[in-house]
Structure formats: structure tokens, C-alpha cells
Amino acid sequence: MSSINEIIEYACTIFPKEYVKAFKVCIQCGVCVGSCPSGRKTPWNVRKTLYEARLGHIMEVLSNDNLWNCTTCYTCQERCPLKVPITDLVRILRNQAIRYGYIKEAHRKVCENLFKYGHAVPINDEIKKIRAKLGLPEIPLTVHSYPESLKEIQKLIEKTGFITFMEENK
Amino acid sequence: MSKYAYFLGCITPNRYPGIEVATRKVLEVFDIKLIDMKGASCCPAPGVIGSFDMWTWLVVAARNLSIAEEMKSDIIVTCNGCYATLQEANYFLAQNDELKVRVNNVLKGIGREYKGTVKVKHVVEILEQDIGYETIREKVSHPLEGIKVAVHYGCHYLKPREIRKHGNCEQPTFLDKFVTILGAESVDYKHKMMCCGAGGGVRSAKRELALEITKEKIDSIIEAKADCVVTPCAFCHLQFDAGQVELTQKLGRKYEVPTVFVTQLLGLALGMSPEELGLNENRTQIESFIKKLYGY
């Protein structure tokens, strides 16, 4: 069972401590949810999400499918009067959700693409033709053209443990 | 002549190569050479891979940055997502030595090292700051007179402000100025600062929601009678262009506001043809815009 402290500890491995700790100063004013494009159209409520996380209702937060409605537009984060890094906290909560197996199939496919091709959105035959027509190399000189580079990416993803927990959660 | 390492990412080379070709062509006019970052990968996308595993997101981003470091070139991007990832990776690694050591311990396994020696610039910054709008104005041979543009900045170009450092993110003006120096008019519209709807993995897993947001945005662009929407982001470009095809199918009425990338718009003002800028490879029609521009 994930706890709020565990989530904060995880966030601090990447983000500066002071940044993450601002999480605890939220006064529930609601500027965030009032600014949210997805919140206007769906039950996604970022204010309530932060509140529930602080109350310790972590599994409810992580299992809520609406957590994936955030487009990460950062409007809430910019407007927060207490400078809570809201959007980045949403990403952190999502990182935790994934660890508990809450991943959508379309997102698993994106991860598989990254591992398999080095691109979340790989090239296809139609685009190869357009590239040639425009005078560009048919295949861009990215990881698509360099098998040894793809091996590098795959090695990194194995090393970070990402691929293991994606497999475990299948 | 100055040079930049062109970080292509995914959407630009693999979905909208017109953005790539236009960017290369217009920067050449201003003596800026773009060099390929051989073997670069997905940035990785900040709202998807960053939403799944921050650590993997950071390590793969650091590898991409290390390629430009080897080339001793600052990076140019044509996607706000790539901009976000690479700039933020640089930002967080610069203020945390321990994190940098941890990242390099992983990169060592593939014979690479992240040093933190290159800057990440968006093509918009290069147009505005390196070249300068006055220099651009002097080169405009085919002013886009009579064209009404709906400018879309894209969330991750402006936010978070603390990292992007482009100032005001509620009412920015630099892209409006840009289209004005090309001879076009920037029209105000209700949802100018709204997200395109695609980010954060919403397009991939919640397509209906992404389209609802796109629809609201495009409806307000239509209401403002704009001839096109201009973006500085390959992913927003995809959402507007492909998204309107999806909206048309879903709603049974036509959504067909032409989508034009900033460097494609500039290319037209420099006298390049829509074909050579890859504009007619869009999925949504571009003819109404071309007709307005050339009168045929």
C-alpha cells in the first residue's frame, strides 16, 4: 500500500525537495480546477485529487481513471497562488499508479514503441514516401537509421527497470 | 554561419516531415546550418513517458543531450514536447549533482556521459532572438497580406514559466508579432490560450476527450474567421490537423481549418511554394488558405 510519504520520497529522487514539499501547503482554493480544460468536460478534479492524496486515500487516487484526463497543460500549476507544482505532482501520482498496475493499453503500446523502435511514434511507409518526395532521407537519421543506437536505448530501459515492471504488470 | 544540432523527435520526422523540410530551408536563408543528431531517439515525451516513469524519462533524455554535447552544438527543436523534456532534463540535472551522478552511472553502461554543456532552444527562440524579427522582415518578399492567422502557442512552449523563462504565459505576444512581420494579421479568439487537447497521453488513451478540447478550440478559431491556425509545436500541429479529420468523421460535419507550422508560414513569406514546404501533405485541406493567399 502506497503512502503519501512514499510518493513524496519517490518524487524527491528527481525533483528538488522544496519543490515537492510545496505539495503540503495547498489550501484547497480551487484555482487549479477552475483553470483545468479537462476538468470542464470530465469528472477529473485536480483539487480534490491533491486533497485525497493528503488525507492518505492513496489507492483511491491511484486507481481513479480520471487521473489520466490531465493533458499536462500546466495552467493550474502556473496559477496556483501557493506555487504548488500541481502538474508535476499529477505526473508523480501517475508514476505510482503505473507501479500498482493501473496502466491503459494505449499507453502500454507507447512504451512498447519506445522500447522496440526508440520512437514513441515510429515511421511508416506512407511517411517514408512523403519524406522522399520532399527531398529528405526516406528514413530519418535518428535511432531509426542506427541499430546500434536502438540497442543503447533498449539497454537503458532495461537498466532503469522500466521494462521489468511493465512486463510484471501485464 | 551558426549551427545547431537538430533534435527531430518523433512527430516531426515520422508524421509531419513538412515541418522538418520547412525548418531546414528557412533557417538556411538566414545562414543557420542544422546538423543531424545521428541515433537520437524519442525525447522521451514528457506527458506520456514522464507520466509512466520519471527515471527512464530522465535517463533517455540525458542520452539525447549527450549526443549534442559530443557534437559541441546547442540543440534546436520543433516540438514543444521535445522542448519540455530536453530543457527540463537539463534544468533538473543542473541543480542536483547526486542526480547527475546517478544518471551517468546508467549512461556509463552504454559508453556515454551527460555533462550539461548544451542549451536547448526552440525554433521560435532562434527566429526571435538569434535572427531577430527585423532581419526577418527585411527578407520577406511575399508578404502574407489579407491572411488572418489564429496563433496557437502550445502549453509547453510557455509553461512552467520558471524553467521556460519566456515571461507572461497568460497573454504572450511574440508569435502574434511574428505573423505580423510576415504581413499577416493575428486574430484574437476566445480559446487562444487553451491546450490543443493532445498532451499528457490524453490523445493516445482518451481520444474522445482530446477531441472535445480540440473542437472547442477550433470552434472559436472558426468563429474568429481565421484562415489558418499557426503552431510552433509538431504535436499540437498533429492534433489540429489529424484531429480535425477525426472530428469530421465523428460529427459528420466538416472541420477543415488549415494547420500551418511557424516555419512553413515563414517559408511562404520568403517566396517558397506550399509544395516544397510540405504543406499539402497535411491531412486536413490547405486549399482554402492557398486560394486566399494567391487568389487562385
Image: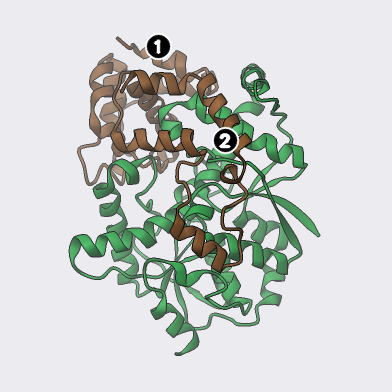
Chain colours: A brown, B green
The answer to whether residue A128 is above or below residue A106 is below
Tell me the element at label 1.
helix
For label 1, the crowd category at 10 Å Cα-Cα, with few meaning under 14, some 14 to 19 and many 20 or more, is few
Amino acid type of the residue tagged 2 in the rendering: Leu
Please identify the quarter of the rendering in which residue B108 is found.
Answer: top right
Look at 52% across and 69% down and name the residue there. Answer: B278
Tell me the element at label 2.
helix
The answer to whether residue B70 is above or below residue B259 is above
Sequence-wise, the earlier of marks 2 and 1 is 1
Number of marks in picture: 2
Please identify the quarter of the rendering in which residue B226 is found.
Answer: bottom left
Q: Decide which of B125, B295 is in the foreground and name it.
A: B295
Q: Which mark is residue A6?
A: 1
Give how far apart the Cα atoms at labels 2 and 1 are: 33 Å
**In this rendering, does residue B46 appear at all?**
no
The spot of residue B104 in percent (x, y) is 66, 21
Quadrant in which the N terminus of chain A appears: top left
